[in-house]
Amino acid sequence: MKHPQTIDYAHHVSCIDTEQQRPGLACCYLMRSGDRYAFVECGTSLSVPGLLRVLEQRGIGVEQVAYVMPTHVHLDHAGGAGLLMSRLPNAQLVIHPRGARHMIDPSKLIEGAAAVYGADQIPAMYGQILPVAEQRVIVAEDNFRLDFSGRELLFLDAPGHARHHYAIWDAASRGLFSGDVFGLSYREADGPQGPYLFPTTTPVQFEPEAWARTLDRFAQLDPAYVYLTHYGRVGNVPKLAHELRRGIASYERLARHHAAAPERHARIKEAITSHALAELRAMNAPLSEQQARALLEFDMELNAQGLEVWLDKQKAA
Ligand SMILES: [Zn+2]
């Protein structure tokens, strides 16, 4: 039986590939405190067998998992929550107040994903999306503190990418589990100047002003590391935060520039793709243009869609 790729970091944090589309695209984290474990993110239902195999391979009993903590309810992070919870008898689901009802009744999430990807794509992309029983759900308000067997976790409301998004501050590792709100950064693009990081403006709640405030709060914590869901742990946090802020500003500018174009979607998508390619070239990233386009295609499509939703909301306001 094949096992997902894993990376073990210090402080009992491991990255597990959730095997969505390609290796290195999306991960979840397994954290240990004493003899108990917690998952941050869970991938889709299709990811769950792999996560269970990792537990088995490491001799971790399913009853030792105390928490499942999806950072937000986008399906690549939380789609597998119902199935995973059904296999973990003692686990509680910790979720943002705006996400809780969608975990208990996932029908709106399924509809939302169908609107973005097409209903026929949902089973192949996400498998079956199961509900979580309400009595197993812990709602994490802003500044909620969770005592995970002596390892304190602080939950911060973290809008900008989605309003149902929290981030988790793990003081033990001085690390922040950021979901999608610290952007995307793929290890294939790492060059001599380090990682390349760019915004994720997936529909439908990109809010640049709220995002800036979220990054201000993160900076106050002075993280040594950020644990990205897409993909893996990164250091040099102030530099990357600066690049993310610049990236968000560029996205706003490019989207506005093409707002009235007849082929708005295609123009915005090409503009943000060209912007990324230029930055990768400037950083001497080890990718040809063709490789970089292939690596970023899926995100650029979603980012362009999300920027269009943002433009339309501004017009309506
Ligand atoms: Zn997301």
Image (cartoon, rainbow, N blue to C red):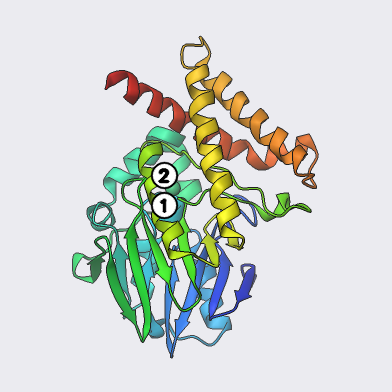
What amino acid is found at the position of numbered circle 1 in the picture?
Answer: Asp
Mark 1 Cα shell of 10 Å, populated few (<14), some (14-19), many (≥20): few
Dot 2: element: helix
Q: Residue 99: x percent and y percent?
A: 28, 53
Indicate the quadrant containing the C terminus: top left, top right, bottom left or bottom right: top left
Q: Residue at x 36, y 78 (%)?
A: 152
Indicate the quadrant containing the N terminus: top left, top right, bottom left or bottom right: bottom right
Q: Residue at x 36, y 22 (%)?
A: 312
Q: Residue at x 55, y 39 (%)?
A: 246
Dot 1: element: helix
Q: Is residue 92 left or right of residue 192?
A: left
Marking on residue 216: 1
Q: Is residue 11 visible?
A: yes
Q: Residue 105: x percent and y percent?
A: 24, 53
Above or below residue 10? Residue 293 is above
Nearest to the observer: residue 18 or residue 227: 227
Nearest to the observer: residue 225 or residue 92: 225
Q: Do labels 2 and 1 touch, CB within 8 Å?
A: yes
Q: Is residue 206 visible?
A: no
Q: How many marks?
A: 2
Above or below residue 17? Residue 58 is below
Residue 161 position by quadrant: top left
Marking on residue 256: none
**Gap between marks 2 and 1 measured at Cα:** 6 Å
Marking on residue 212: 2
